[in-house]
Image (cartoon, helix red, strand yellow):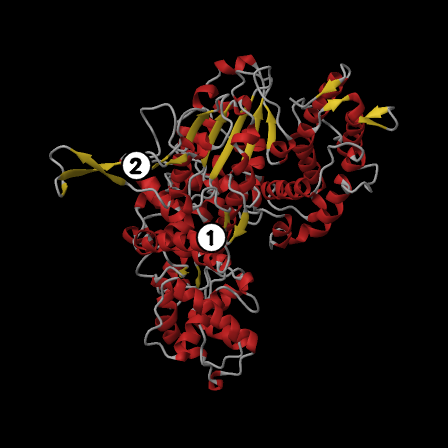
């Protein structure tokens, strides 16, 4: 969309004019009408959008967390776009630009919890995640799919951003009394400046709680807020109600004091509470400490630590293999994850045995193509034969905030490459777009173009349709639920939802097939042999298959990145760039035959098992999860995390590829083999000073290397 720029409003560089015109095209695509707008109006609404996205030179840098007041938006224009508008005109910008963007879901307000504060003059405005995703996808093959998702987001705006939240949503089922108790403990452990911790904690209740509007905010105590971002919004609403509290959100006490805010006790306690909530969000123990009310229900609490290997692997890639002898609980482990994450509501099948975010698909030995998973169109019946896989993927696409777990049971009873090829290929097309991850179509919408929901059937009598001397009636081809699925697929096709996790169980015996490297390369493999027999009698074994009062959210499992460079470009991980780019290539080595001997590829170079880009890329992704779990330590403190990630990749990605006869695994002119050399490499690089845990990752790797080397004594070895 071209705009006629007038130099009376500043002399803008050509690249800025191009940015303004480009974002206007996307704004129109998102549903804002420009009919009746002057050229200056178009320019302003586009610049407001760019400013909220913190865009200075490229749309690719657009952000959803750059909140600006309407006055700040004007200042941003003048500084970065060469505009000359008076910042005192912020009311006009808010009413004529920002309000339109908020109403269409393009922008959101920091005070969005209430419709009364939705367009506040003092609230900051930023772009919605949904719109940023649309901008990232604009002009790509993903544009139509993302636009459909944005339109769906717009339809739900009345329920998500304008309507006041229900009290139950705000409470998160944790009492203020419980939260105060844990926060008090946090203060005692972390702050040495306070003399009477209880007085500090109670001061917030006495001074802030009376100003909270339970009808609008859904809370009666500040300690019912368990999210740092919401806490900021609640405090902002308090400031708007009583400007004597202006300064309460300042990061530094001197700044608060300069605004005539003199209550240091209140300021520092809320500052600590914000830090406390932020720490909970970043901590791997968030789900144990954030919701103490769970402890009242069961005597045992499942922690994320028990599932750390599974979660780290799934956050790296949503395809996991669980290997082990029959009866070790592989498929049950997938079911446990579903129970732990299933939210309250219609997904909970209280009378049944499985939650709605879990699906078990039993692989049959006669699967030799993808029709058993992806279905097929029958010209004879005129309908597309749906499968449980498709129905489950559709359900995941309709519940984007919930993790969905598909278990392919006994996955290698049939040749995996034959029935799973399309999935494996599409898995490699994953691309980060905005805050989500998209893929190419697993099933394009063209595949369903001939599908009709009804067909005309000739009958002898009582037909609803009469044509000459013949009578017809319309016959439904699908059940009501399947009709919903077909309607969706005709309009959208099917990509892999980024909240869908596929986990295959593997049992190697005479009835199963070996995996090709194509499959192994695209999955993480976790072995589940062993375990204590006495564990089946513990109370924990029952609790694992019960719904939780506070389910673990999708964020614990969902990948943030697809490529290593996305990690290193992220502001949270940028400080680790030098350390990562030095250590990881040295540990893995080059895959072109020039690797240093003291590296994984230095050992594997003369074998067909060398690792390349995919493994290095996923090592960085895996490491990012460990760094986040460790709450972002200083760069000089992550060498141990790099070692942990490398051991995990070695055990779950590299060793599953190693198989063959003695000759294939020989090194050093037959004097050694890759398994012995890898054992030496692990011991020299990763041996801990003290290691009394037989199940530590280090000891697991050494045991597996010894097991495979012992097999090789009989002339052939493999991982499984």
The quadrant of the image that shows the C terminus is top right
Q: Which residue is mark 2?
A: 481
Q: Residue at x 35, y 34 (%)?
A: 347
Instruction: Point out the tag, 1 or 2, that comes first from the N-terminus.
Output: 1
Q: Is residue 706 shown above or below 42?
A: above
Q: Residue at x 33, y 48 (%)?
A: 219
Label 1, label 2: how many angstroms apart (C-alpha)?
Answer: 49 Å
Q: At which x and y percent is residue 67? A: 47, 62
The label nearer to you, 1 versus 2, is 2
The quadrant of the image that shows the N terminus is bottom left
Q: Name the side, left or right, on which 213 lies relative to 623.
A: left
Q: At which x and y percent is residue 164? A: 30, 53
Q: At which x and y percent is residue 262? A: 46, 63
> 95 and 566: which one is in front?
566
Q: At which x and y percent is residue 294? A: 41, 32
Q: Name the side, left or right, on which 659 lies relative to 328.
A: right
Q: Quadrant of residue 699?
A: top right
State the residue lying farthest toward the front: 469
SS class of the residue under badge 2? helix
Q: Quadrant of residue 671?
A: top right
Q: Residue at x 42, y 29 (%)?
A: 359
SS class of the residue under badge 1? helix
Q: Which mark is residue 270?
A: 1
């Amino acid at each position: 969309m071209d705009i006629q720029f007038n130099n009376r409003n500043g002399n803008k560089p050509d690249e800025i004019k191009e940015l303004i015109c480009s974002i206007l095209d996307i704004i129109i695509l998102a549903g804002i009408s420009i009919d009746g707008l002057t050229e200056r109006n178009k320019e302003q609404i586009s610049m407001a959008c760019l400013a909220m996205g913190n865009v200075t030179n490229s749309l690719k840098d657009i952000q959803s967390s750059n909140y600006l007041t309407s006055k700040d938006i004007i200042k941003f224009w003048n500084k970065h776009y060469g505009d000359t508008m008076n910042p005192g005109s912020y009311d006009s910008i808010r009413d004529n630009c920002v309000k339109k963007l908020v109403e269409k879901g393009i922008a959101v307000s920091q005070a969005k919890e209430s419709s009364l504060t939705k367009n506040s003059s003092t609230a900051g405005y930023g772009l919605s995640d949904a719109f940023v995703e649309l901008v990232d996808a604009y002009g790509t093959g993903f544009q139509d799919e993302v636009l459909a998702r944005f339109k769906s987001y717009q339809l739900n705006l009345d329920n998500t951003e304008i309507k006041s939240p229900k009290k139950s949503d705000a409470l998160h089922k944790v009492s203020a009394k419980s939260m105060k108790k844990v926060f008090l403990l946090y203060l005692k452990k972390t702050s040495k400046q306070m003399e009477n911790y209880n007085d500090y904690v109670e001061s917030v209740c006495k001074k802030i709680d009376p100003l909270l509007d339970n009808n609008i905010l859904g809370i009666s105590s500040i300690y019912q807020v368990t999210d740092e971002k919401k806490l900021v919004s609640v405090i902002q609403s308090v400031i708007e109600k009583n400007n004597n509290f202006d300064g309460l959100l300042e990061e530094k006490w001197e700044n608060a004091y300069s605004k005539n805010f003199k209550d240091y006790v209140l300021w520092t306690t809320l500052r600590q509470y914000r830090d406390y909530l932020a720490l909970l969000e970043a901590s791997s123990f968030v789900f144990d400490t954030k919701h103490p009310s769970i402890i009242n229900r069961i005597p045992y609490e499942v922690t994320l630590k028990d599932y750390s290997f599974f979660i780290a692997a799934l956050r790296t890639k949503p395809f996991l293999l669980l290997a082990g002898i029959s009866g070790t609980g592989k498929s049950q482990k997938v079911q446990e994850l579903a129970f732990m994450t299933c939210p309250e509501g219609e997904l909970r099948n209280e009378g049944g045995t499985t939650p709605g975010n879990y699906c078990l698909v039993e692989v049959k030995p006669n699967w030799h193509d993808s029709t058993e998973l992806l279905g097929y169109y029958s010209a004879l019946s005129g309908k597309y034969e749906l499968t449980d896989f498709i129905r489950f993927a559709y359900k995941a696409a309709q519940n984007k905030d919930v993790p969905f777990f598909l278990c392919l049971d006994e996955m290698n009873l049939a040749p995996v490459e034959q029935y799973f090829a399309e999935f494996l290929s599409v898995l490699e097309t994953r691309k980060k777009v905005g805050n989500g991850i998209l893929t190419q179509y697993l099933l394009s919408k063209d595949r369903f173009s001939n599908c009709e929901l009804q067909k005309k059937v000739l009958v002898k009598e009582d037909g609803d349709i009469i044509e000459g001397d013949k009578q017809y009636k319309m016959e439904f081809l699908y059940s009501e639920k399947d009709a919903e699925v077909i309607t969706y697929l005709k309009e959208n096709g099917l990509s892999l939802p980024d909240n869908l996790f596929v986990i295959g169980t593997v049992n190697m015996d005479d009835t199963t097939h070996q995996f090709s490297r194509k499959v192994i390369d695209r999955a993480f493999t976790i072995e589940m042999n062993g375990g204590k027999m006495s564990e089946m009698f513990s109370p924990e074994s029952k609790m694992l298959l019960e719904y939780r009062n506070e389910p673990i959210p999708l964020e614990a499992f969902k990948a943030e990145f697809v490529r290593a460079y996305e990690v290193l470009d992220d502001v949270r991980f940028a400080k680790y760039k030098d350390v990562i780019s030095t250590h990881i290539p040295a540990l893995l080595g080059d895959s072109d035959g020039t690797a240093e001997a003291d590296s994984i590829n230095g050992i594997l170079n003369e074998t067909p098992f060398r690792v390349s880009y995919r493994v290095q890329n996923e090592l960085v992704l895996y490491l990012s999860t460990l760094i986040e779990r460790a709450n972002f330590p200083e760069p000089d403190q992550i060498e141990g995390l790099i070692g942990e990630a490398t051991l995990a990749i070695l055990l779950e990605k590299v060793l599953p590829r190693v198989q063959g006869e003695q000759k294939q695994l020989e090194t050093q002119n037959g004097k050694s083999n890759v398994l012995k050399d890898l054992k030496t490499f692990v011991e020299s690089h990763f041996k801990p000073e003290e290691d009394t845990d037989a199940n530590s990752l280090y000891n697991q790797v050494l045991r597996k290397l010894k097991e495979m080397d012992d097999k090789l004594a009989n002339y052939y070895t493999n991982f499984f």
